[in-house]
Image: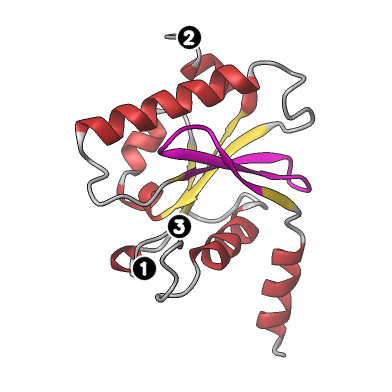
Amino acid sequence: MTDVTRSAREALDKIEWKGDIKINEMISISLHKKTKNIAIHITASDNLNSPEKLDEINKGLKELALKINNPKIYPGFDSVTFTSWIVMLHDRLVKWLGFFVDYEGKDPRSVPMILDYYKRRGSRNNENSYVRPEQWAIEPLFASMARDKFVEKLAKDV
């Protein structure tokens, strides 16, 4: 095992998580205990830009904000993160939502979360993969927001 492979494996091992908590048809989350973040996952879809899918994503984010507004729900988790090819292609929208997009990988959670993204992505033959093969050439980006800011921005209109 090379030093690079070893450090990547060590970074991945730092992520202790519980995954696939469904919020709605388009949004699920995983809880990363060691980094204390709630990671958002958007369901793979044929037409992510359709008004119906965007509306469902918006509803899911608002539902998540309402849920985590209760401090008894997921206590100790202090941030919401989003690591995806979607962040790369739609970084302005992600920033507009209030996330900090970590273009340079300076956030210490960035590398382990991107490695976890690749791990969750699965293989090209995995029909349950989070990422469709046509998006595999797009590098993922890490974005984060404080939990209270996420609640403030997204739960206010509900």
**Residue of label 1:** 136
User: What's the mark number on residue 156?
Assistant: 2
Query: Residue lying furthest bottom in this view?
Result: 1
Sequence-wise, the earlier of marks 1 and 3 is 3
For discs 1 and 3, the disc positioned in front in the rendered view: 3
Which numbered disc, 1 or 2, marks the residue that appears first in the sequence?
A: 1
Q: Residue at x 73, y 56 (%)?
A: 15
Magenta span covers which residues?
A: 19-41
The answer to the question of whether label 1 and label 3 lie on touching residues, with beta carbons closer than 8 A, is no
- Mark 2: which secondary structure? loop
Q: Callout 1: 10 Å neighbours few (<14), some, many (20+)? A: few
Between label 3 and label 2, give the one nearer the viewer. Answer: 3
Q: Is residue 146 left or right of residue 32?
A: left
Is-magenta flag for residue 30?
yes
Q: Amino acid at mark 3?
A: Tyr
The mark nearer the N terminus, 3 or 2, is 3
Please provide percent x and percent y for residue 85.
Answer: 39, 55
Question: Could you tell me which quadrant the C terminus lies in?
Answer: top left
Badge 3 density bin: few <14, some 14–19, many ≥20, Cα 10 Å: some
Give yes or no for residue 97 being in the magenta stretch. no
Q: Position of residue 21 (x, y in %)?
A: 60, 40
92 relative to 138, above or below: above
Residue 130, labelled with which disc? 3
Colouring chosen for the image of the structure: secondary structure
User: Considering only vertical position in the picture, is 140 above or below 143?
Assistant: below
Badge 2 density bin: few <14, some 14–19, many ≥20, Cα 10 Å: few
Q: CA distance from mark 1 to mark 2?
A: 35 Å
Labels 1 & 2 near each other (Cβ < 8 A) = no
Residue at (41% x, 76% y) in the render: 125
Q: Position of residue 26 (x, y in %)?
A: 41, 39
